[in-house]
């Protein structure tokens, strides 16, 4: 599903060059649920941005679903992102002046679906996250957990094969976090591949596999069951 | 997607009403001010005789003082002397030819409640109506003999006929002009050339005269000119006859020459005429005359002055300042929306999609600004009409061309204003905002 080989990413200013990822190699198979942990500034988010085609690597090779995406132009990358990738963010990133219905509608608009098809998909995902009755509400009228469920619904509406979650429970209390995690696990059981960045060791352990990133490199690829608890902290 | 972008634009405008109003106002003030000036310039630049531009010619003869050239742009007097006009009228080369000038009469009706009033008159030869394609509602023009012998007939403008005879067919009725009875022989339809090409010496944008009387009345009624009269030699004659024979120039002269051969023949005629006058001791300056098309005539007479042109550029510069202000406001607004653009990029919007969305938003502002600008331009033009007290009525008005131009100008201004901010937001790195939002 996702294969990175010797991917590098550096950011350069006038005086300094920072290496966010160095010879980063990783493979995520179809249907996997992978958690990504590591200290702040280790390159987790850069990895997620490159995986989600929001940033281009400085070097190396990235294959998404068997297709080399390193040299695609913006339009092609946007299309792939729209069709194959769903995003879930720590801050939910719902558009505040759009209703929940219209928020979920955004990726479907760029996909070019008909109004009928969009409505069908939106109603379906709203039902899946249990918020059908709130379709016309604005994000500010919802709790944090409900907003994150809407963000998940928005990510799922286009039926992506690959879901990228950047600390999806970071802004939620433990109860809400558990509900969101259960929803992600449910989605994974349907067959959607999930890569989740998290600081929460308990959540990380619930994934099939945990990857630790330190100084822009993968340092531990063992299955979760074999990892010491301290390693994910 | 265009419909979606328009709905997003309207939603965005509603979300920030004050900022949106400021941007609309910036565009509106710029468009309003520039369109007011450009409309005046545009109307001043019109050529009401464009359809006959290749066949009509204003005639100038250099009969001026040998010691000093005439103070005109081509150093030939704008108008002719009475005696030269009479001499040219004897030519049968032009298809039509007109000698004329501005005058005024006191107008009244016998046994009428209408009080006597002073009206602008045009004293002209009969070809005036054919040469300038003036349509008649009732009757027609006078016979050719009236151009050289006194016939007290008059042609009314449509407005005058409305005023004196309630718009009824007044042919055969009598109008009293300066206490003399004149028989109405025709009524012309509305005809308002602007600028008044046929007589730009006496106000390029004044109204067309209300009544028209034959050229043959001069001696009988001792008609002088109510327009500009210039001279360098009053001659030796006495009284009115002395004025007619003097070197004073006060007659406007136009000819219609329908082809090149006819024009060449007429030029030869003028050359021969001037040569003949030289032999008699007149026309002491080097032989010079001019036949100017209506379009050339307007330029020669500087109907659209350099001041007007400069004002036009200044108004466009003002619009540019307004556009720059709008750029700053749009940039602030769009960059504030950068997190939303980041989310849209993550959800599949390409840079082009983000660029188009924001360009449509700025265009929406431009259309609203354009509509408000047109209203401001109408107000500005009305203000000019009010201040000019009717003198600029034919110019201070906005036709459909200028309304469309105003909308076009507003769109161009808003696109110019929106290009950079839209480009900036489409080029921002979405990942920055996705993490920090």
Image (cartoon, rainbow, N blue to C red):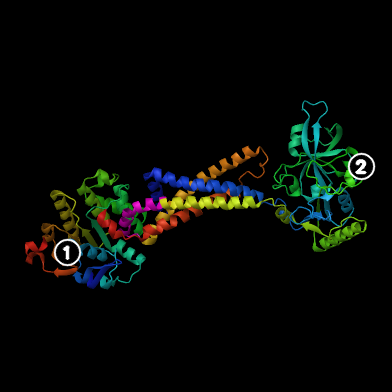
Whether residue B2 sits left or right of residue B273 in the image: it is left
Q: Nearer the viewer, residue A183 or A175?
A: A175
Mark 1 surroundings: few (<14), some (14-19) or many (≥20) residues within 10 A: many
Specify the segment rendered in magenta. B329-349
Q: Secondary structure at mark 1?
A: strand
- The residue lying at 8 percent from left, 65 percent from top is A227
Q: Is residue B343 magenta?
A: yes
What is the magenta segment's predominant secondary structure? Answer: helix
Q: Does label 1 lie on the same chain as label 2?
A: no
Front-most of A125 and A151? A151
Q: Residue furthest front?
A: B67
Measure the C-alpha gap from mark 2 to mark 1.
117 Å
Residue B65: x percent and y percent?
83, 53
Q: Residue at image x 79%, y 26%?
A: B112
Which quadrant does the N terminus of chain B fall into? bottom left
- Crowd band around label 2 with a 10 angstrom C-alpha radius: few (<14), some (14–19), many (20+): few
Residue B150 rendering spot, x and y as whole percentages: 90, 41
In the figure, is residue B228 to the left or right of B222? Answer: left
> Circle 2 sits on which residue?
B238
Q: Is residue B293 visible?
A: yes
Q: Front-most of B98 and B252?
A: B252
Q: Residue A145, image x and y in percent?
A: 20, 49
Q: Quadrant of residue B16?
A: top left
**Label 1 chain ID:** A
Residue for badge 1: A34
**What's the residue at 86%, 50% (across, down)?**
B85
Where residue A55 sits, quadrant-wise, is bottom left
């Amino acid at each position: 599903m996702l294969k990175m080989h010797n991917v590098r990413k550096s950011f350069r200013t006038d005086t300094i060059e920072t290496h966010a990822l160095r010879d980063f190699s990783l493979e995520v198979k179809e249907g996997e649920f992978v958690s990504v942990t590591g200290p702040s500034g280790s390159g987790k988010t850069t990895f997620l941005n490159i995986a989600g085609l929001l940033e281009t690597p400085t070097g190396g090779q990235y294959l998404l679903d068997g297709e080399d995406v390193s040299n695609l132009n913006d339009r092609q990358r946007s299309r792939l992102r729209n069709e194959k990738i769903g995003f879930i963010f720590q801050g939910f990133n719902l558009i505040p002046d759009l209703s929940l219905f219209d928020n979920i509608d955004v990726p479907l608009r760029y996909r070019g679906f008909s109004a009928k098809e969009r409505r069908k998909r939106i109603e379906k995902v709203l039902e899946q996250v249990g918020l059908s009755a709130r379709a016309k509400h604005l994000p500010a009228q919802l709790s944090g957990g409900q907003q994150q469920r809407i963000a998940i619904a928005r990510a799922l509406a286009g039926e992506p094969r690959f879901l990228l979650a950047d600390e999806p429970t970071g802004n939620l209390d433990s109860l809400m976090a558990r509900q969101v995690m259960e929803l992600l696990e449910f989605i994974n059981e349907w067959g959607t591949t999930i890569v989740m960045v998290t600081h929460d060791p308990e959540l990380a352990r619930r994934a099939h596999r945990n990857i630790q990133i330190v100084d822009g490199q993968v340092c531990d690829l063992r299955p979760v069951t074999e990892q010491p608890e301290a390693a994910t902290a | 997607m265009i419909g979606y972008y328009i709905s997003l634009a309207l939603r965005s405008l509603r979300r920030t009403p004050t900022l949106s109003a400021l941007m609309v106002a910036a565009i509106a003030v710029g468009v309003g001010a520039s369109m007011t000036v450009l409309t005046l310039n545009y109307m001043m630049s019109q050529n009401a005789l464009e359809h006959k531009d290749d066949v009509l010619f204003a005639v100038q003869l250099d009969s001026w003082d040998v010691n000093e050239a005439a103070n005109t742009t081509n150093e030939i007097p704008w108008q002719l002397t009475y005696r030269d006009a009479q001499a040219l009228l004897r030519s049968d080369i032009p298809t039509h030819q007109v000698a004329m000038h501005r005058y005024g009469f006191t107008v009244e009706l016998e046994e009428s409640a209408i009080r006597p009033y002073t009206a602008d008159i045009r004293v002209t030869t009969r070809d005036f109506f054919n040469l300038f394609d003036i349509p008649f509602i009732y009757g027609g023009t006078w016979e050719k003999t009236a151009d050289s012998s006194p016939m007290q007939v008059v042609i009314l403008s449509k407005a005058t006929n409305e005023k004196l005879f309630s718009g009824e067919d007044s042919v055969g009725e009598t109008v009293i002009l300066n206490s003399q009875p004149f028989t109405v022989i025709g009524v012309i339809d509305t005809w308002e050339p602007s600028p008044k090409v046929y007589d730009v010496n006496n106000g390029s944008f004044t109204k067309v005269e209300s009544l028209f009387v034959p050229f043959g009345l001069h001696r009988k009624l001792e008609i002088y000119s109510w327009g500009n009269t210039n001279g360098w030699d009053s001659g030796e004659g006495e009284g009115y006859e002395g004025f007619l024979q003097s070197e004073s120039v006060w007659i406007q002269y136009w000819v219609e020459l329908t082809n090149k051969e006819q024009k060449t023949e007429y030029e030869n005629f003028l050359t021969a005429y001037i040569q003949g006058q030289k032999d008699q001791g007149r026309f002491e300056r080097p032989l010079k005359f001019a036949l100017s098309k209506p379009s050339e005539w307007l330029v020669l007479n500087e109907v659209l002055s350099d001041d007007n042109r400069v004002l036009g550029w200044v108004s466009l510069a003002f619009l540019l300042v307004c556009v720059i202000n709008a750029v700053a406001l749009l940039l602030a607004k769009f960059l504030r929306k950068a997190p939303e653009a980041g989310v849209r990029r993550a959800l599949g919007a390409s840079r082009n999609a983000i660029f188009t969305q924001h360009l449509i938003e700025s265009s929406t502002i431009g259309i609203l600004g354009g509509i408000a600008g047109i209203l401001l331009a109408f107000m500005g033009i009305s203000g000019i009409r009010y201040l000019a007290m009717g003198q600029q009525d034919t110019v201070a008005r906005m036709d459909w061309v200028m309304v469309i131009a105003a909308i076009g100008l507003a769109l161009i201004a808003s696109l110019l204003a929106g290009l950079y901010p839209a480009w900036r937001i489409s080029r921002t790195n979405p990942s920055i905002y996705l993490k920090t939002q």
